[in-house]
Every structure is written in C-alpha cells, then in structure tokens.
Image (tube, rainbow, N blue to C red):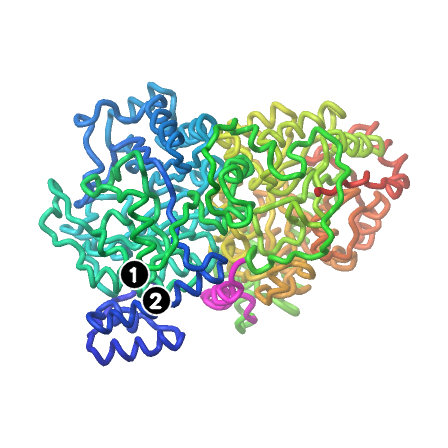
C-alpha cells in the first residue's frame, strides 16, 4: 500500500494526548503520525508550548547554518506570464478566461518592462507564475504560441527566463506547474530555482465532486509528488509546501508534510517548505469557506517545523496574515518570508498587499530577528554551486551573492549574456578548444560523500523494501521447474513465459550447466562458431560529472585531484593514434559536465571526422544525449540529427543499468528514468542510428529485474530493429560508493554471470544475434565460461579504458589482437575482427591492425591535464 493510499483514522485530541506528544517533542524524540495529528489540535497554553519547542528547533537550525537570529526574504517581481490555465481550482482568482485578458501571454516587451523596473528597484528574483498548460484547454493559448513560434508554454517560459537573465540579471524562479523529468531538464539551465506547491496529499480533494481540486488534472497529489521528486533527482533547488484550510483533515496535513520530508531527506533538494493559510476570495466557489483559523495555522507551522527538522527553511507568506500576527508565525518556527515585491502585487492573492519591506524588518526585529535579503535559491545552494545550479546560471547567482554567506549582496543586478555566463564559471576550463595544463586539488578524497549521495539509511530502507529483498538469496525451486523451462526453451527460446525465464534465472548446479549448454547450441545456430571483436580505442573526454550515480567511481567534481577534460586537439590526437595502429572505431563517452559548452558533443564528433574521416564514431550515452538536448534547448531528435551530421555513427546503449525505476532510483541520483532511456534509443533507431543495448547487474537487482529488462529490450528490437548487440555489464563494486556505503552487494557471483549471459541468449534469440562478453569486467577464465554459455563477441581492444578501472576492475584496460584470440582459443573457438556493426573490415584495416598489434602495447595515453 502506498503512502497516498493509507487509510486515515481520525485522531482523538485531548489535553492529555497533546501533552504526551509535546513531552516527546520537547525531549527531541521522534513523533509518529498520530502524535503529529494530535499536536495539530493544540490550543491555548498547549499551543504556546508547542510553538516554544518549534521555535527552539528553528533557532538551533539557524545557528548551525551560521546565521543565528536571521530571518530571510527574497526581493522579487512577479511575472504572471499567462493567467490562462487548464485547471479549475475552486479558490483561485488568478486563472481566468481568454475573454478577460488582452492577450493569452505577456509579450517579451511586457516581461522585460516588469523585470527592468524590478532591477532598478533592487529586486534580484523574477518569479514566473502561470497557469498549467493552458494550450491544452484554450484555443487562444495554442494560437498565440503557434503565432509566436513556441512549441508549448514551457518553451516560452524558457525563452523568457533567458531574456530576463541576459537583459536584467534577475534570477528566474519558475513556477510553471506540473512538469515531466524531460521538461525539468529543459528549464534547469535557465533558472536559479523552481517550485510547485504540493498543497495536500488528500486525494478526495481532487477525485471527488465538491473537492476544491475536482476537475483539475494537475492537482492529482501523485502527479505533483512525482514532479517534486523528479526535480529533486535533478538537483534543482525546489520550493514546495502545503495549503491549510481547503477541506483536508489533520491526518492529511501530517501525511503531506511527511511526503515532503521523505523527498527532502532522500535528495536534499527541497530548499524551503511554505505553510500557507487559506484565505477566501470573492467570486470563487469557496468564497463562503472560512479562512484558516489562526491557532490552527500556528499549530500547522509548528508541527511542520518539528517534523521537517531544524535544517529546513519554513516559510509563511507575510501578506496573508495581519501584521500583528507575524511575530506569532516567527514564534511558531518560521524563518523565511518568501518573496516580497516592492513593485508588483501578489497576483495569486491580489487582495492582500505586500507589507512594506521597512515595516517587515521592523516587525521581525520586534520579535527578535534581523531581516536579511536572500536570492531565489537559499544560501546553502548558492554556496554549494554545482550540481545545484547550471553552469550558465552560476555566474548570475555569484554576481548577486555574498561569497561567504550566500545571502544577497548589496548590489544591483546587471544583465549578462546567458551563454557567455557559462564561459565565466570557475577557474577551470569551460570549453575543449584550449590545451589543459592545470594542477589538481591538494586533497585526495571527496569530503562531501554524504551530501552528494544523500541519506544512505534512506537508501538502505529502500533496498529492504523491495518486494522480495534486493540481493536476497534465491528461493528454493524444484528441479522440475528448470527442466520444464529448458524443454520450453528448446522449442522456442524467446517464447518462454516470464515464470519459466525466472526459473532459469535462478538455475544453479547441473540445471545451470544444462541452460548454458542450451544457450551455446542456440548461439551456434544463430551466429556460428566465430568469436568476433572490434579494434577500437576508448576515449573518455571528461570525467567531471555532477549527475551523482551512486554506483559510479568514475565521476569527479571539478576540484577533485583526478578530474580532467581533454581538448579537441587532444581527442583528435588520440583518434589519429588509434587509426595508425589499425583501429576502425573510437568509442567516446564523458561525464555530464556542466562547464563544457552545450555544443561539446557535436564539436567532438566533428573533431573525430576531421582527423580521421573513415573512423567509426561510436559515442554518447542516452544520458549524455538527453542532457545535451536539454542544454541546447532542442528535441532529442534534433540533437541526434545534428550529431549524425557532425559525424556520429552509432551510440552505446549505456546508462540503461536496469530498466526498472524501482532499481534505478536507488542506483542513480538525478539520472534519466527508464522511459527516457527508451525514448532516446527509439528515436536514434528511427533516425537510422544503431545502438548497442546493455544491462548492469549484480548490485541491488534481482533475477526478476533481469527478465523484465531483457523483455523490454526485445520489445524495442521488435519495433525498431536498431540494436546491434547486447552487452551484459557485471557491477564492479570495489570503489563504488553504493557498495562502500553498504547498500549494494559486492557484484554478481560467477553463477549470476553465467545465468545472465545464457538467459540473454535464449530470451533475445531471433531478435538480437550478438551477445558480448566484457573482458574488462570479467577474468579470462570467466570469459571462457561465457563463450561456452551463449556469448559470441569479446567487444573491443579499447587501448584505453577508464570507467571500469576507476571502479576497481583488475582485468586491464587494453587487449591486443593476440590477447583476444587467446581468449577465444581457450573456449575452443576461432576469432575474427569485425566492424562496429558486425560487418567485415577492409583488408587495409585488418593488415594495419595485424602489423601494429605489438605496437598497441606502446600506445601511451597523452598527458591528461587536470582541472584546477
């Protein structure tokens, strides 16, 4: 049962139960759902005691943050980009109809007028607020977007955010409503922060007639939670919150806060939580509903503070309470007033004017607090920089922030070209066009392990909550289960049922031997006896990466001692060197490096082809592709077409890991969901760009995930026919963060390796002919076993391989042709050089590879420059 489906029981509130819960909170003990709901009913003296506990916790948090006694706000302008919306919230006066506005959207000139006047008055934030996807409901919105050349509302939001950054220097804070993971990637490079109010997890408010969100597709609590979680995975400083008094119960409020806490603890991206009180508005369906009661509101703030802890910033809109009530909000645990504008009204609550900043400072001081200005992102995220801010936004943030505190500096914003902003980031290089000769940092290990990879206890809990326990021992299975599955596989290898496939995935001992023999027979009938390989070189052009995959030991921060970036010239040198010793392919991947120009992948492709026009470029993972497309503001199809024009020939199907989000969210932080990997691969195939397919196994996965992953790949292949091979990738655990933290198991067993390769041969029979064995990750003896159990390919000679080596692989990073042939001979098989797409290579290339085979041992990687 999911959290949102958990039945609520009304909590009986008595003075005695409130005091028992208060005693636990005062002692610093955890309070459960029932106790939290009880505290929401505190009144009178009990409420005062509750606020005292919450206020003390808030003060401790400010002390830990290095700004004791400081309450913050952001000086902003409201940019109501459009008041049209496809939702029908019963309390909203912001959303309207096309007949009540002059135009469906503010024009660029109107946006700039607001932003420029705000900059003149010292504002530093531009809050973009708008209705959800109005083009889906209103013809006028669709026509306006079409007439002005925008695909959708979010494309216009992106364009206007860039305009504001470039022309005024104000930092965009984007509130465009529900967004998909892909849309979040499009908007992160143009914003300092984003936000979406959760409001409430109460599904009845959305699903039942009479509920305030009934008829509003974007108010489904599950959809809103997914946006908040996707933004958090993407390392976007994110604002969310709850709305008090819209028909929810006390239990609903607690559940809403706990859902926010869950996401905040897991990803660290929730920068502030708004606790907002309902105010009835005229001319709405809820105009007769009473405003949220003050004591009820104070209790909600205090309980939110206690549940969310001292580090969370708790925000209350100062214009939605009477001035004499603001001291009570501070006493209840508030430490942030949110955005306050000296220019524009609160377009969502236009009947409630902003307090004058001087008056807000005076009222805060009367409660014992100093009022300080901050930026759109909270100070902690400003100081941290990457991965919380895109390289093109960081200079804008730094120009407006005090370097020591991260609070707003006493300066006026100044416009800066958005693309040029990327070139100004840090003292490290921001392009690949100049040589590198930089020193690394003096420390040798990451000091921010916990911050980068999140709460490991949360991860452990996630692993333990997987339905059958990730890494659990296999359930006992009768020999007849495997025997029946093998008989079915003999008749139709790819046509066996999921239950039969799962029985084979758990096979061991004689049953495993029998499955491997069958897989070997299927391999022989499909591709014959020859073991193939490609002569290639692996080029990792940058290992700077801020995605934060928990299994990866390759990724470095810009300041890490092992961080490097190769210039285009250095990449070209490596390509030329590989061609000279007979290579037909260069395999190229890199980290998601925000400081490199958005055109970096296309530039690299051109550099390869300029140096060696006939070299096959096998490059750029789906993660790199979707990141590159997002940074360039174009579709994946457009990006791929541009890459192909620049010289891309095929794509490695890495970043697949396990195509099951249950596992992916444990393995990766901010990495693309399974559906996005599939979308990129299908798009490439549709454009005629072939890809490999991969599966990384042996971490927190189970055999049921292997079966599901292989079935997904087969379904794609049925549709597109674009996979050239399947590459099982055993998890290399030695230096992997998720293993060192005790989350993952120490890689697959030898049984697992044999089972995966054999199972892949059977389930993919008739769809994907080539099953590769990765000598980088498996010992020679293991490779021999895989070649006897379904595999027919040994991949590439590589000449230079970094990713597995940094993870702790001890199987080398280069093989000669003689080495490859020896591996095949050990399995009793001949070997043949192939092209990337399994064709024959030219006589010239084969001769060059043979002639210089011994020279490969003397291919020394060019000096790797380090990023300062």
Q: Quadrant of the N terminus?
A: bottom left
Q: Which residues are magenta?
A: 454-473
Residue visible at 64% across and 48% down in the picture: 557
In this rendering, position of residue 607 left or right of residue 237: right
Residue visible at 45% across and 50% down in the picture: 232
Q: Quadrant of the C terminus?
A: top right
| Closer-to-camera residue (126/824) | 126
Q: Say whether disc 2 or disc 1 marks the residue closer to the N-terminus.
A: 2
State how far apart marks 2 and 1 are (Cα): 8 Å
Judge whether residue 605 is colored magenta. Answer: no
Residue visible at 60% across and 61% down in the picture: 738
| Closer-to-camera residue (852/244) | 244
> Disc 2, disc 1: CB below 8 Å?
yes
Q: Residues within 10 Å of mark 2 (few under 14, many from 20)?
A: many
User: In the rendered image, is residue 584 in sight?
Assistant: no
Residue corresponding to mark 1: 301
Residue corresponding to mark 2: 54
């Amino acid at each position: 049962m999911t959290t949102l489906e958990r039945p609520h029981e009304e909590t009986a509130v008595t003075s005695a139960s409130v005091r028992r819960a208060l005693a636990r909170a005062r002692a610093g003990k955890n309070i459960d759902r029932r106790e939290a709901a009880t505290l929401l009913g505190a009144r009178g003296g009990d409420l005062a005691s509750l606020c005292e506990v919450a206020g003390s916790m808030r003060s401790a948090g400010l002390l830990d943050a290095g700004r004791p006694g400081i309450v913050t706000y952001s000086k902003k302008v409201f940019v109501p980009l459009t008041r049209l919306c496809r939702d029908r919230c019963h309390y909203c006066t912001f959303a309207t109809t096309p007949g009540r506005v002059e135009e469906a959207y503010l024009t660029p000139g109107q946006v700039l007028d607001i932003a420029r006047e705000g900059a003149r008055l010292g504002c530093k934030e531009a809050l973009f607020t708008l209705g959800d996807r109005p083009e889906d409901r209103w013809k006028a919105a669709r026509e306006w977007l079409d007439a002005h050349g925008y695909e959708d509302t979010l494309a216009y939001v992106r364009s206007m955010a860039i305009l504001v950054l470039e022309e005024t220097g104000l930092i965009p804070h984007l509130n465009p409503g529900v967004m998909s993971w892909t849309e979040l990637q499009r908007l992160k490079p143009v914003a300092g922060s984003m936000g979406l109010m959760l409001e409430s997890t109460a599904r009845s408010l959305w699903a039942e007639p009479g509920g305030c969100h009934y008829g509003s597709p974007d108010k489904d609590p599950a959809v809103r939670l997914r946006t908040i979680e996707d933004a958090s995975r993407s390392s976007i400083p994110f604002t969310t919150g709850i709305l008090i008094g819209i028909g929810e119960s006390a239990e609903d409020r607690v559940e809403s806060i706990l859902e926010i806490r869950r996401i905040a603890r897991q990803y660290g991206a929730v920068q502030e939580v708004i606790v907002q009180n309902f105010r009835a508005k005229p001319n709405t369906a809820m105009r007769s509903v009473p405003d949220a009661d003050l004591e009820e509101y104070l209790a909600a703030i205090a309980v939110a503070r206690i549940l969310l802890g001292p580090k969370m910033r708790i925000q209350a809109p100062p214009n939605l309470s009477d001035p004499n009530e603001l001291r009570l909000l501070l006493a209840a645990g508030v430490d942030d007033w949110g955005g306050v504008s000296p220019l524009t009204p609160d377009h969502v609550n236009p009947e409630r004017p902003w307090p004058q900043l001087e008056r807000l400072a005076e009222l805060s001081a009367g409660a014992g607090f100093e009022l300080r200005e901050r930026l759109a992102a909270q100070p902690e995220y400003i100081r941290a920089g990457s991965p919380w801010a895109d390289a093109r936004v960081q200079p804008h943030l730094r120009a407006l922030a005090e370097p020591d505190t991260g609070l707003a500096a006493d300066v006026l914003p100044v416009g800066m070209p958005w693309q040029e902003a990327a070139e100004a980031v840090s003292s490290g290089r921001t392009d690949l066009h100049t040589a590198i000769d930089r020193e690394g940092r003096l420390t040798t290990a990451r000091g921010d392990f916990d911050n980068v990879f999140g709460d490991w206890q949360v991860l452990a809990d996630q692993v333990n909550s997987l339905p059958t326990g990730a890494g659990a021992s296999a359930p006992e299975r009768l020999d007849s289960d495997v025997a029946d599955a093998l008989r079915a596989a003999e008749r139709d290898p790819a046509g066996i049922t999921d239950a039969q496939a799962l029985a084979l995935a758990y096979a061991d001992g004689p049953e495993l031997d029998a499955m491997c023999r069958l897989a070997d027979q299927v391999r022989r009938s499909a591709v014959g006896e020859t073991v193939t390989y490609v002569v290639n070189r692996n080029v990792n052009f940058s290992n700077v990466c801020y995605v934060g995959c928990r299994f990866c030991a390759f990724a470095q921060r810009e300041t890490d001692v092992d961080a490097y970036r190769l210039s285009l010239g250095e990449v070209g040198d490596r390509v030329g060197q590989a061609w000279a010793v007979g290579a037909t392919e260069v395999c190229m991947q890199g980290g998601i490096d925000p400081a490199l120009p958005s055109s970096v992948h296309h530039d690299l492709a051109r550099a390869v082809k300029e140096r060696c026009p006939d070299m096959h470029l096998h490059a750029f993972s789906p993660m790199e592709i979707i990141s590159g497309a997002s940074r360039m503001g174009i579709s994946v199809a457009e990006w791929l077409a541009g890459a192909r024009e620049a010289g891309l020939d095929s794509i490695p199907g890495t970043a697949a890991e396990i195509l099951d989000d249950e596992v992916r969210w444990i393995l990766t932080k901010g990495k693309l969901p399974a559906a996005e990997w599939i979308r990129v691969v299908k798009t490439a195939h549709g454009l005629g760009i072939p890809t490999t397919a991969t599966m990384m196994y042996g971490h927190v996965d189970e055999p049921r995930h292997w079966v599901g992953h292989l079935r997904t790949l087969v379904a794609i292949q049925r549709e597109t026919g674009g996979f050239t091979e399947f590459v099982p990738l055993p998890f290399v655990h030695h230096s992997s963060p998720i293993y060192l933290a005790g989350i993952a198991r120490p890689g697959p067993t030898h049984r697992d390796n044999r089972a995966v390769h054999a199972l892949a041969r059977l389930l993919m029979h008739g769809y994907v002919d080539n099953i590769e064995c990765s000598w980088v990750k498996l010992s020679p003896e293991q490779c021999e076993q895989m070649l006897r159990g379904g595999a027919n390919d040994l991949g590439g000679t590589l000449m230079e391989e970094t990713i597995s080596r940094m993870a702790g692989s001890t199987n080398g990073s280069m093989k000669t042709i003689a080495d490859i042939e020896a591996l095949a001979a050990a399995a009793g098989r001949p070997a043949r050089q192939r092209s990337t797409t399994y064709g024959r290579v030219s006589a010239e290339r084969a001769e060059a590879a043979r002639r210089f085979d011994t020279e490969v041992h003397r291919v020394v990687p060019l000096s790797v420059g380090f990023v300062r």
